[in-house]
Image (cartoon, grey):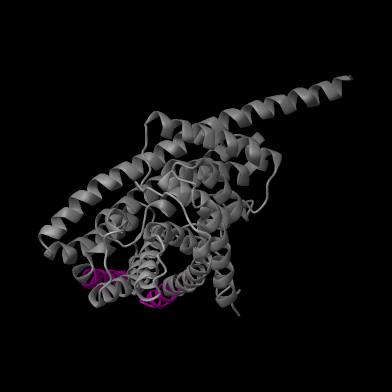
Amino acid sequence: MNNTARIKKKYQLIKFQKLVIVSLLIGFLSAFLGISLKKITEYYEEIFFHQASTNPLFFVLFPIFGLSIIYFLREYLFRKKENKGIKEIFESTNSKSKNLPNYKIPSHFINGLLTVVFGGSTGIEVSTVVASATIGSVAQRKQNVFRQYKTELICAGVAAGVTALFSSPIAGILFAIEVISRKVTRAFLISNLIAVAIAFGLVFLLDEKPLFAVTITTWHLRAIPYFILLGILAGINSVYLTRCVLLFKSQFSKIKIHYYKILIGSIILSISLFFFPQLYGEGYHAIKGIFAHSNEVTLSFSLVLTFIGIILLKPIVTSATLASGGDGGVFAPSLFIGAFLGLLVALLLNTYLNANVIPVNFMVIGMAAVLSASIHAPFTSIFLVCGLTNDYTLFLPILVVCLISKYTAKKIFPFTVYSYSASLSK
């Protein structure tokens, strides 16, 4: 071996070692950020929701207070820049010169937390994804040797953040592939596998429990036609969610005085929360409640109206939250809509068709189906929801329904809130 080849081999080895070390660091920091945000949000959301449940006046006060604080933080602390969610990641990965600035880490962490704990009807998932992507972006800029690995290291942060939130390393990697990167290189595999391994190791050490304690026993082949129906309905609902978010953002962008946006968004949110407290924050408290009593629920006219009201209002309050300055995305709203849609469909089938389907199965499958259609990432949705319940019994029906919901949604409207732009739709 000549000197040139020897030097080249040594350089490649050093580059590989540095990639491993930086991936370890990104994995740990992204997971720590994700777990911290999740824990703090859960703790304070429970406190504030309890206060509002005791005194409904807080359903009016909390949203306007939270959105106002976020506005002032953006104006005076975060360079007057609005957070664009996952589109910020696309702008960075699609450009050699554009990078995610460092302040995006505290900006998304704080604003995501404030949005949810004060009743904003969204979730912390997108806040975590962008903040953890920024960790990868910052690491990539530290040394010239990492310049060529910009997308890979951003994806490593994203994958570790998703792993930390949902206790599913497979979902983390699949989300990075399906939504962010769309391609897999050797550097991508090395950096992302290391990052999610570290993230999952931290989740394991901290003994993080599944978000939803659900007992799934079995599923039956005779339920397949009903699963297909659920997939189609999930696809339609996801398009409704997507179009709502895009419409509200478009209309609110015409309002020049930002505080008017806050007032309008707060009014929509406050009125909705007053009548439907289930819409508060991420809505996971409501999902846990219906999971706990899904087999005991009996269908009534008032219950049907309540469920329909919740399913129709959730996209509206989510859109109002985001358009008026709240930080978040469609992850948690999709899971929320899917759970209520699945239970409603199961109750209607059992009551009027004597289908004898299992409500909890429809809730779990509904969650995955609406998420799959909303972000056009069926495989991410499968492992993410299975991670949330720590149960893979429904893997096959979830796979089928996620594919049906995604292609139903794409047939009706070919964009997600991440991929849509006015120029593309013309």
Horizontal side of 176 relative to 387 (left or right) equals right
Return the residue nearer the eye: 66 or 82: 66
Image position, residue 115 (x, y; %): 30, 57
Please tell me in which quadrant of the rendered image residue 316 appears.
bottom left
Horizontal side of 303 relative to 155 (left or right) equals left
* Any part of residue 128 in sight: yes
Q: Tell me the quadrant of the picture where the N terminus can be found.
A: top right
Horizontal side of 213 relative to 176 (left or right) equals left
At horizontal 32% and vertical 55% (from top left) the residue drawn is 291
Return the residue nearer the eye: 198 or 87: 198
Above or below, comparing residue 252 to residue 325 in the picture: below
Outermost residue toward the right? 2
Above or below, comparing residue 40 to residue 366 in the picture: above
Q: Which residues are magenta?
A: 246-272
Please tell me in which quadrant of the rendered image residue 348 appears.
bottom left
Image position, residue 221 (x, y; %): 53, 60
Q: Is residue 242 magenta?
A: no
Image position, residue 259 (x, y; %): 27, 69
Image position, residue 39 (x, y; %): 31, 42
Q: Main secondary structure of the magenta part?
A: helix
Please tell me in which quadrant of the rendered image residue 34 appears.
top left
Return the residue nearer the eye: 364 or 71: 364
Q: Tell me the quadrant of the picture where the C terminus can be found.
A: bottom right
* Any part of residue 257 in sight: no
